[in-house]
Image (spheres, rainbow, N blue to C red):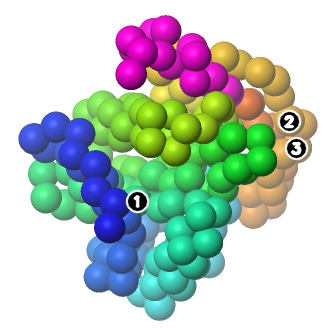
């Protein structure tokens, strides 16, 4: 089972059935906050819905099409970071993430994302990481900016959020750029 220690307070591990209750609780506690940018929040109405997410994530992982990890901070699950899909033909991985509202501003997501990038390039030997975020989602957009991604463009009306469309900004980071910035591995 995949586990990635980041530091003494933070690690990632594959999402598992035992996480469903905590993921639902975290979603429910942060519902209004998360709903602003995530289209699945209103469909998460019970622990069973979170368990369905876990089951789907495990299936993607078994098929080598994705990987969802819980973010564990000080021994508590505080969010999720995922390879939403892996394009093996073009060697591109698409990362998505969310964090409970009370855990913002601690550098958790930047460190978790850096760990997932490092794993994609060093272990999976992928060539590109893609992160997309709504134009006005300043917090999500700050992560790829901090990590040296290039803003590659904008997808007009790229996502339907409950009652309106939002444009997405696309960020890309190439393997060579990561190694140049962080030292070749």
Q: Residues within 10 Å of mark 1 (few under 14, many from 20)?
A: many
In which quadrant will I find the N terminus? bottom left
Please tell me which of labels 1 and 3 falls first in the chain: 1
- In the image, taking residue 8 as reference, residue 160 lies left or right, namely right
For residue 127, the mark is: none
For residue 69, the mark is: 1
Kindly indicate whether the residue at mark 2 contacts the one at mark 3 (C-beta within 8 angstroms). Answer: yes
- Give the secondary structure at mark 2: strand
Q: Say if residue 46 shows up in the picture.
A: no
For residue 157, the mark is: 3
Residue 157 at what x, y percent from top left?
Answer: 88, 43
Q: Which residues are magenta?
A: 171-185
Q: Residues within 10 Å of mark 2 (few under 14, many from 20)?
A: some
- In the image, taking residue 74 as reference, residue 81 lies left or right, namely right
The image quarter containing residue 133 is top right
Comparing labels 2 and 1, the label whose residue is closer to the camera: 1
The residue pinned by badge 2 equals 155
Q: Residue furthest top?
A: 180
- Give the secondary structure at mark 1: strand
Residue drawn at the location 13% of the way across and 58% of the way down: 75
Comparing labels 1 and 3, the label whose residue is closer to the camera: 1
Q: Is residue 180 above or below residue 127?
A: above
Q: Is residue 36 above or below residue 125?
A: below
Residue 18 at what x, y percent from top left?
Answer: 29, 82
């Amino acid at each position: 089972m995949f586990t990635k220690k980041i530091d003494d307070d933070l690690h990632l591990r594959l999402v598992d059935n035992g996480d469903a209750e905590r993921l639902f609780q975290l979603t429910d506690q942060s519902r209004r906050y998360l709903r602003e940018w995530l289209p699945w929040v209103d469909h998460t109405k019970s622990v069973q819905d979170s368990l369905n997410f876990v089951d789907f994530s495990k299936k993607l992982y078994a098929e080598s099409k994705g990987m969802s990890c819980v973010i564990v901070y000080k021994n508590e699950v505080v969010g999720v970071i995922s390879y939403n899909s892996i394009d093996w033909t073009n060697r591109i991985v698409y990362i998505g993430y969310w964090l409970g509202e009370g855990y913002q501003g601690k550098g958790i997501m930047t460190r978790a994302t850096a760990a997932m990038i490092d794993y994609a390039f060093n272990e999976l030997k992928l060539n590109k990481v893609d992160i997309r975020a709504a134009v006005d989602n300043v917090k999500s957009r700050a992560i790829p900016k901090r990590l040296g991604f290039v803003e590659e463009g904008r997808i007009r009306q790229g996502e339907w959020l409950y009652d309106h469309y939002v444009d997405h900004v696309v960020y890309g980071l190439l393997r060579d750029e990561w190694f140049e910035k962080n030292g070749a591995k």
